[in-house]
Amino acid sequence: MQQETQATFRIWRGDASGGGFADYPTTVSEGMVVLDAVHQIQAEQANDLAVRWNCKAGKCGSCSAEINGKPRLMCMTRLNELDMSQPVTVEPMKAFPLVRDLVTDVSWNYRVKQGIKPFKPREPDAPDGTWRIAQSDVDRVQEFRKCIECYLCQDVCHVLRDHQKHDEFIGPRYLVYAAALEMHPLDTEDRIPELRQAHGIGYCNITKCCTAVCPEHITITDNAIIPLKERVVDDAFDPVGKLVKIFSRRHT
Amino acid sequence: MADYQTHEHDVLVIGAGGAGLRAAIEAAAGGASVGLVCKSLLGKAHTVMAEGGVAASLANVDDRDNWKVHFADTMRGGQYMNNWRMAELHAKEAPDRVRELEAWGALFDRTADGRILQRNFGGHKYPRLAHVGDRTGLEMIRTLQDHGVHQGIDVHMEVTVVTLLKDGDRVAGAFGYDRERGRFRLFRAKAIVLATGGIGRAFRITSNSWEYTGDGQSLAYHAGAELKDMEFVQFHPTGMVWPPSVRGILVTEGVRGEGGILVNSEGKRFMFDDIPENYRSQTADTPEEGWRYVQGDKDARRPPELLTRDHVARCIMREVREGRGSPHGGVFLDIAWIKEKLPNAAEVIRKKLPSMYHQFKQLADIDITTTPMEVGPTTHYAMGGVNVDGDTQMSSVPGLFAAGEVAAGLHGANRLGGNSLSDLLVFGQRAGHHAAVWAASHSAGTVDRAEVDQWATRTLEPFERGASAEAPYQVQHDLQDSMQDLVGIVRTESDMQTALERIAQLRVRAGRTGTGGNREYNPGWHTALDLDNLLTVSEAITRSALERKESRGGHFRDDYPSKDDAFASFNILVRKGADGAMQLERRPIPQMTAELATIIEENR
C-alpha cells in the first residue's frame, strides 16, 4: 500500500569555521515530511547530523530551516509538495550565527524579548478580584499569541538577514510580541517610545516577507506592525492627541 | 581533572516546561537564587503541545462545580490509587493558580459575561477546563516564560543533566553538559527540583518528543529516591495513525468534548457498547442525550466518548483486534457529523479546534470539517514517577523535589485530561516554594570532585568507542519495539518476562554504543547517553507491571483482566538496592481522612 521511492537530500554540514553541502540518498514513502527524512539520514547514515526539533507537529517552532531556499518548519513540509526528482536542499537559517549543520544560535531572540517592557495589568475591577474581558477583546490579540517563536520571520527579514541590524531592530517576531502586549485588554504599559527608538520599528519597510513565511499564518505586517507604526506616528507627531490619551489612560 | 564550568544556585530546577517554570518563579519569589536547566530551548517543552485545557473548579460555566467534585472526579479517574492529599490540594488550589496566570497575561476564552470559559472533558462531571481554543499549553508556557524571564532566574538552555550529586544522604548538585558545544557543567545547589516530564520515548508509538526519555525518574532512582506507580502508563486513545510518519501525534480530547464521536468500519458508534459500572449513572443513554450534554444542557449526561482515557483506548483496541478498524489500523473520529445539528458546523470546528484543523489539513490532507479522522492509541503520559510528600513535593532524598509528570501521586492509575496542566501549576508552585524554604535553612553540601571526574570520563566513553561501535539509534529503536509490543496497552506475564530479558540484553548493547564526530551538537552522542535513562524506566515499568496481577486504570493484563480488591490497598514502589539491583515494595495506601472519604461517598 505504501509507495516507496528514492530521493536525495542535499544537507548543509559544517560549523562557523566552514562547511558545505553533502548529498544523502534515502528511501522515502507516502506522507513523509522533511524532518522525517532528516531523522532517517541521521539514524542510518550520519549519527552526528545536528538538527533541533521537538514536537514534530508544528507547535513548538524548533525545526526551522531553509528548504529549497525557503524558510520553513521541517516538520510541516511534506515531501509531496516538493519536486523530488531534484535533490532537496536543507540548510540552516541565515540570520543567526551557525552552531553546526542545521542548528543556529538563536539566543539573540531571547535577549531581545527580555528588553521589551513586560505585561502590566490594570487593577482587578470585578467584585471577585479578577477581571471581566469580552471575547471580542481576546480575539483581537489571539492571532499574535499563536506565535510559536520559530523565528522564520526574523530569518527572512532583510533588515536582519542582509543588513545585520540586530542591535538596532527587534525584528517582526518582537513587533508581534509588542503588539500583543500593547493591544492586550488589561495592559497599561506604554512601549511606544521604545518601539520608535531602541526597537527600531522605522526600519521595517513593510515588504511583508515575514507574513509570507509565518507557519501560523499571522498577518504580521498588516495586523501587528502597521497599527504599531500608526501609534508611533500619532505619539510623535500629535502631541495634543498624546496628552488626551495619557489623561484618559489615567482615568480608566 | 575534568574541565567544567561551575554554577552555584540555592535552588536548581531541572526541566522548563510548565512545572519547572512555575517552580522557578516561586523559588525566586521566595528569595532563592534560581538556576533553570532545560534540555531544549526555553519555551519548547512538551507543555506547548497540551491542547484541551487546564482543569480548575472555577464554576464559571456550571455553578454546581467546586473543589470537592473535582477531588472526587480525580480520585474516581485514578481508581483510588491516588495520593489523596495531593488530589485534595490540587482540587483546592487549581482555581487560584489559573487566575494567577491571567494576572500574568494569559488570555483564556471567555463566557458571555466576560469570565474564563470552561469546557467539558473526559471524567470531569462539569465543564471545568479553562482553555484557549486548542492551544492552551502554548498560552500557558508562553505566559510562564514571559513572566519568568523578568524574575532574575538564570536559564541554562540546551543543557542535559547526566547525574545528581550527593553529600551523604542529601542532594548537593548535578553534573551535565551543554548540547551546543558539549562542554561540561557542574551545578552546585542546596535544593533541586526535578521537572523533567515523562517517559514516552520508551515506546515506539508516542505523542512525546525526543526529550521524554525518563531523565528525572532515572536521576532520582540512581540518587536513591523511590519511584511509585510505574506500571500506570497512559495510552491516549486518540493519536494520529496515518500517514506513518505522524503516527502517535496527539488528537486532542477536545474533539470529543465538542461533540466528536468514535465510529468503527461498520459505521457503528461503538462506545455505547461497553460502559463501566462505576460510570454508568453519569453516562448518556442515547446519542441524543450525549449531544445535548456537549451543547451545555445541564440535565444531560456525558456521551461515552468522554469516558476515561484508559477505557476509551481499550475499546478502540478491541474494535481493531476484532476486525472493525479503519484502513490504517485505527478507528474513525468524526466531528464533521455535527453538520447535521449545526448550520455553521465547519466554522464552529475551525474556531474551536483550529490547530487540529491545520494538523490534519497539512499532515494528512484531510479536512476534518468534512471527513472523519483515523485515530488510535498513543503512549502519552506516565502517572507514576518519583514518590513525593504530598504537601512539599520532596522525595525520599533530602533536598530533592519533583513536580509535574515526573512526580507520582496525583493521578493514581489513570489521569483525567486537563489535570496535567493544573498539576504543573499547583505542584510546580508547591515544589518551588518548599525548595526555597529548604535552601534557606540548609547550607550548601559538598560535591565530590573525584566523582565528578569519573562522570566526565564516563560521559565521553561513546567517543572512545567511535562510529563503528553499536549504533545508539538502533538500540533505542529496539527498546521502543520491545516496550510497545510486550509492555503496551495489553500485557501478559510471559510477554513481560521476555521484555525483561530483552532489556538486560539491550543494557549490554547500550554499554557498547559509540559515536563519531565531535562534542558540538552531536545527537548521536546525546542519544547514547540517554539510553541508560530509557532502560531504567523501562525496567521499572515492566517489573511494576509484573507485580500488579490485576487490571486497573492504565494497566491492563490479559491474564488478569479484572480489577482485584486485593491489589486495591497498596502502591508498588521501586528503588535501587544496595547491590544495584531493582527492588520492589508493596506499600499500603494510607487511610483517607474522614472528611475526604465523605466527599467521595457524596459524589458516588
Image (cartoon, coloured by chain):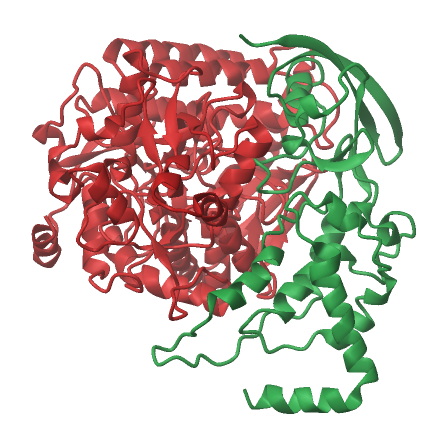
In the displayed structure, B556 sits above or below B572; it is above
Q: Which of the two residues, B325 or B77, is positioned nearer the viewer here?
A: B325
Residue drawn at 19 percent across, 58 percent down: B68
Q: Colour of chain A?
A: green
Q: Which of the two residues, B485 or B310, is positioned nearer the viewer here?
A: B310
Please give the count of numbered marks on the rendered protein: 0
Q: Is residue A20 left or right of residue B207?
A: right
| Visible residue check, residue B515 | yes
> Where, by quadrant of the figure, is residue B330 drawn?
top left
* Residue B361 coordinates in the image, percent (x, y): 56, 33
* Residue A205 coordinates in the image, percent (x, y): 87, 59
Residue drawn at 69 percent across, 17 percent down: A41
* Residue A28 coordinates in the image, percent (x, y): 66, 14
Which quadrant of the figure contains the C terminus of chain A?
Answer: bottom right
Q: Colour of chain B?
A: red
Residue drawn at 29 percent across, 54 percent down: B127
| Visible residue check, residue B444 | no
Q: Which of the two residues, B306 or B148, is positioned nearer the viewer here?
A: B306
> Where, by quadrant of the figure, is residue B158 drawn?
top right
* Residue B101 coordinates in the image, percent (x, y): 46, 63
In the displayed structure, B506 sits above or below B210; it is above
> Where, by quadrant of the figure, is residue B312 drawn?
top left
Q: Which of the two residues, A237 or B288, is positioned nearer the viewer here?
A: B288
Q: Is residue B513 left or right of residue A108?
A: left
Q: Is residue B49 left or right of residue B229?
A: right
In the displayed structure, B579 sits above or below B253; it is above
